[in-house]
Image: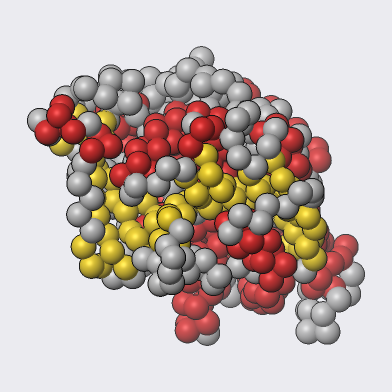
């Protein structure tokens, strides 16, 4: 069983960490220390300290002469390909400012001639490592391209957001769907404390880590590798990066594939909780149709087992060594598995059955893989970067707005909306959101391929429909199936995307079936 858990953690870790439009959940209740004040009238904004995270440096004098896009890219052999570091201005509004940050890239070089250029890849998150993603990107049929992934600012081996692992642990130990005012207060305080620790350790970076900043980095990288136009594959949040690029730089937009589109309308026709609810219902129907399914003979029975167990775990967590599988950890694990499709859903059925019989090991391991939690209690960088980026991008309506959104979600999503709880991340963030950069439209850009999966949990299919329409030059590719991110899972989808990168652009909408 231990070996199975390890393999499964790798599978689902790639699903959410590499492709995640991440939601945030927590685990065993632990009272957070009251270190920082909660501001119920707005974000608890704090002075920005002068700290220097790794890779932040003084702007080199040669940039004055060469410009940012005149740097030499010194590729060196590294695991999985070739790697390089370049610099970018901390603040693109003041590119002559005194401070620079580091951006890390990994290239998997083309293996066939003639070379067609570069495809930049971004796995989403926000907070996923593009450098890691490049080594696993399916390049079948695309061997004439260099595949380049970069860690966006604030992420991985680029200048990273740094937060306290202790505060991460405390946050993930809260009840994510608080049942009373005390639990609600603890959840808010834990979010505030984590945000304060990120500001204390990351300083000015937190004011300069928006999607707009990343898009300007990407255009610089395009120029540095010598490409006239950007060719790009972005998954999940990576679709926002690609769409914003086409809006800001339509004249240098080339072939852009935006897979599992996020909402760019600002209206969010279908909330993420509805996507997870839909995916859980699809799992329940699938499970009921399997001979080996022990959760029930109908979708309603399976859903009832999952719901009843979720309720029970709130007051009766299952011990796993010196830890516990609580309601919040269980919800995280279920959602983690819903990023995937039927190929791994048997593990979800097994995990639910184990948990209801007093064994929470598998589900807690799945939750840990989502959280990027290591055995020693330390955390990877994905969820540290997540709030730093999205909360700079997004204004919020405070705790009252988060509570109202959670109540509305529970009305239409009886499991996901009810148990995922309110999102207090941005109302607790110590840095203000940037000024609205305006709507995302792509007039003047080349045709853009927008991909949506009908059973996508994290980015509901409707987002792809609206993104293709709003861009104005979108070509919609629909995958009739389950899971988050379509490329690499279906030959019809793969062929359509590869043909597009080889200048065979679909004239109309395309539909592929699982």
Residue 201 drawn at (x, y percent) = 25, 37
Q: Nearer the viewer, residue 8 or 189?
A: 8
Residue sitting farthest toward the left: 61
So how many labels did they put on this image? 0
Q: Is residue 195 above or below residue 430?
A: below
- Nearer to me, 155 or 193: 155
Whether residue 79 is visible: yes
Query: Against 121, is 470 above or below?
Result: above
Q: Foreground residue, 95 or 37?
A: 95
Q: Position of residue 47 (x, y in %)?
A: 28, 19
**Residue farthest to the front, as pictured:** 114
Where is residue 241 drawn, in percent x and y? 51, 40
Q: Nearer the viewer, residue 368 or 438?
A: 438
Is 209 placed above or below 480 here?
above
Q: Is residue 239 rendered to the left or right of residue 482?
A: left
Residue under the image location 66 percent in, 56 percent down: 504
Q: Is residue 481 above or below residue 276?
A: below
In the image: residue 368, left or right of residue 340: left
Q: Is residue 221 visible?
A: no
In the picture, measured across the screen, residue 111 lies left or right of residue 312, that is: left
Residue drawn at (18%, 33%), measured in percent from left and top? Answer: 66
Instruction: Report the residue at 52% width, 66% height from top.
Output: 142
Place of residue 310 in the rendered image (x, y in percent of width and height, measured from the top left):
69, 57
Residue 141 sits in quarter: bottom right
Q: Quadrant of residue 396?
A: top right
In the image as oriented, which residue stretches furthest toward the top? 41
Question: Which quadrant of the rendered structure holds the C terminus?
Answer: bottom right
Question: On the picture, is 261 further left or further right than 162?
Answer: right
Q: Residue at x 40, y 47 (%)?
A: 227
Say how the picture is coloured.
Answer: secondary structure
């Amino acid at each position: 069983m231990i070996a199975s858990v390890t393999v499964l953690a790798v599978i689902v870790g790639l699903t959410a960490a590499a492709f995640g439009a991440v939601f945030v959940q927590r685990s065993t209740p632990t009272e957070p220390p009251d270190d920082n004040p909660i501001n119920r009238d707005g974000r608890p904004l704090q002075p920005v300290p002068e700290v220097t995270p790794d890779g932040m440096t003084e702007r080199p004098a040669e940039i004055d002469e060469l410009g940012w896009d005149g740097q030499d890219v010194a590729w060196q052999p590294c695991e999985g390909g070739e790697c390089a570091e370049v610099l970018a201005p901390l603040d693109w509004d003041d590119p002559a400012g005194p401070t620079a940050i580091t951006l890390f890239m990994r290239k998997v070089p083309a293996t066939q001639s003639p070379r067609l250029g570069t495809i930049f890849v971004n796995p989403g998150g926000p907070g996923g490592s593009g450098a890691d993603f490049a080594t696993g990107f399916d390049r079948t049929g695309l061997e004439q391209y260099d595949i380049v992934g970069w860690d966006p600012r604030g992420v991985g081996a680029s200048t990273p957001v740094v937060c306290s692992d202790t505060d991460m642990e405390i946050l993930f130990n809260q009840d994510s769907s608080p049942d009373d005012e005390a639990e609600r207060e603890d959840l808010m305080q834990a979010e505030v404390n984590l945000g304060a620790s990120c500001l204390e350790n990351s300083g000015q970076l937190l004011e300069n880590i928006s999607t707009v900043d990343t898009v300007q980095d990407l255009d610089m990288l395009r120029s540095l590798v010598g490409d006239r136009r950007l060719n790009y594959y972005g998954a999940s949040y990576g679709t926002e990066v690609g769409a914003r690029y086409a809006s800001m730089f339509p004249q240098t937009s080339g072939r852009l594939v935006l897979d599992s589109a996020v909402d760019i309308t600002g209206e969010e026709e279908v909330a993420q909780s509805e996507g997870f609810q839909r995916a859980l219902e699809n799992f329940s129907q699938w499970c009921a149709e399997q001979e080996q399914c022990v959760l029930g003979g109908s979708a309603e029975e399976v859903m009832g087992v999952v719901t009843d167990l979720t309720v029970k775990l709130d007051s009766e967590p299952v011990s796993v060594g010196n830890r516990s599988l609580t309601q919040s950890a269980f919800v995280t694990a279920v959602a983690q598995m819903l990023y995937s499709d039927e190929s791994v859903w048997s593990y979800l059925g097994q995990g639910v059955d184990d948990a209801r019989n007093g064994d929470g090991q598998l589900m807690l391991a799945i939750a840990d893989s989502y959280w990027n939690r290591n055995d020693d209690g330390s955390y990877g960088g994905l969820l540290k970067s997540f709030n730093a980026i999205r909360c700079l991008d997004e204004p919020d309506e405070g705790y009252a707005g988060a509570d109202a959104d959670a109540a509305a979600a529970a009305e239409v999503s009886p499991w996901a909306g009810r148990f995922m709880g309110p999102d207090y991340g941005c109302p607790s963030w110590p840095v203000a959101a940037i000024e609205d950069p305006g709507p995302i439209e792509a007039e003047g850009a080349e045709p853009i391929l927008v991909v949506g999966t009908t059973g996508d949990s994290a980015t509901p299919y409707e987002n792809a429909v609206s993104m293709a329409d709003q861009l104005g030059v979108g070509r919609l590719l629909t995958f009739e199936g389950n899971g988050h991110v379509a490329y690499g899972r279906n030959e019809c989808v793969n062929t359509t995307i590869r043909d597009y990168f080889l200048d065979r652009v679909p004239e109309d909408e395309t539909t592929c079936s699982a």
